[in-house]
Image: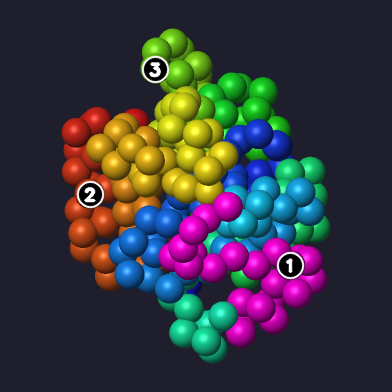
Amino acid sequence: MKTLAIVSQKGGVGKTTLATALAVEAGRAGKKTVVFDLDPQASASFWKDTRQDELVAMTAIPAARLGHVLKAAGDAGCDLAIIDTPPFSKDIAYEAAQHADFVLLPTRPAVLDVMAMNKTIELVRHYDKPFAAVLTFCPPFGREVDDTLQVISQLGAEICPVRIGNRIAYSRAQQTGRAAQEIEPDGKAAQEIKELYAYVCMHLYAKNPVARSMNDGRKRASGGSR
């Protein structure tokens, strides 16, 4: 079983949105997927309560039990565990990073938000875990994205080539217990999640030639990291 942690010390950057959308994408790809909701606000759990199927399993747990439940999930034949973490909780972030095979660090395209991510980067590096920053709520134009990418590069973090746009499909899906790719299968949000899932798989499953090929193609098209 592989484990993805989604970590940020700031709130409102889309951690739960990414966790649930990626879980749905993994489930649709045939992977037995479980989301562990470590956020006391239980946003992911409320999302699950409104769903009408069992495509994704969801469990709200205290961080202290994470290691135990991950082992149990693996023993039960789970393929992928996704950890959704709360903001402003260093101890929980440490616990999630410790058990992860790969960590996504979502951030809005704002320089102050990225600077606040510095402590999270130090936390992940403490456990020598592979990680990448992913930009969320990106505007369709403006210099904010380029400025943010420059700051992330200065922090020495890998930058996910997939950007998550500021799209109504994400919030609308969250309100109905679905993912953006379920309510707008042919929309831009659906394509973003598909590409982000492929990128995550590239890191989780080193022998995934499809994901690696997609990522290399994006880099060639953009002349490197974009």
**Left or right: 172 with respect to 140?**
right
Task: Identify the residue under disc 2.
Answer: 214
The local secondary structure at tag 3 comes to loop
Residues at marks 1 and 3 touching, judged by CB atoms closer than 8 Å = no
Query: Magenta segment, which residues?
Result: 50-72
Residue 91 sits in quarter: bottom right
3D distance between C-alphas at marks 1 and 3: 37 Å
Report the coloring of the rendering: rainbow
Q: Amino acid at mark 2?
A: Met
Asked if residue 17 is positioned above or below residue 225 in the image, the reply reads below
The local secondary structure at tag 1 comes to loop
Residue 45 sits in quarter: bottom right
Residue 159 lies in magenta, yes or no? no
From the top left corner, tell me how far across and down residue 187 is, in percent: 30, 34
Instruction: Categorize mark 3 by other alpha carbons within 10 Å: few (<14), some (14-19), many (20+).
Output: few
Residue located at (31% from left, 32% from top): 188
Task: Give the numbered dot on residue 140.
Answer: 3
Asked if residue 83 is positioned above or below residue 194 in the image, the reply reads below
3D distance between C-alphas at marks 1 and 2: 35 Å
Instruction: Please tell me which of labels 3 and 2 falls first in the chain.
Output: 3
Q: Amino acid at mark 1?
A: Ile
Task: Give the numbered dot on residue 61.
Answer: 1
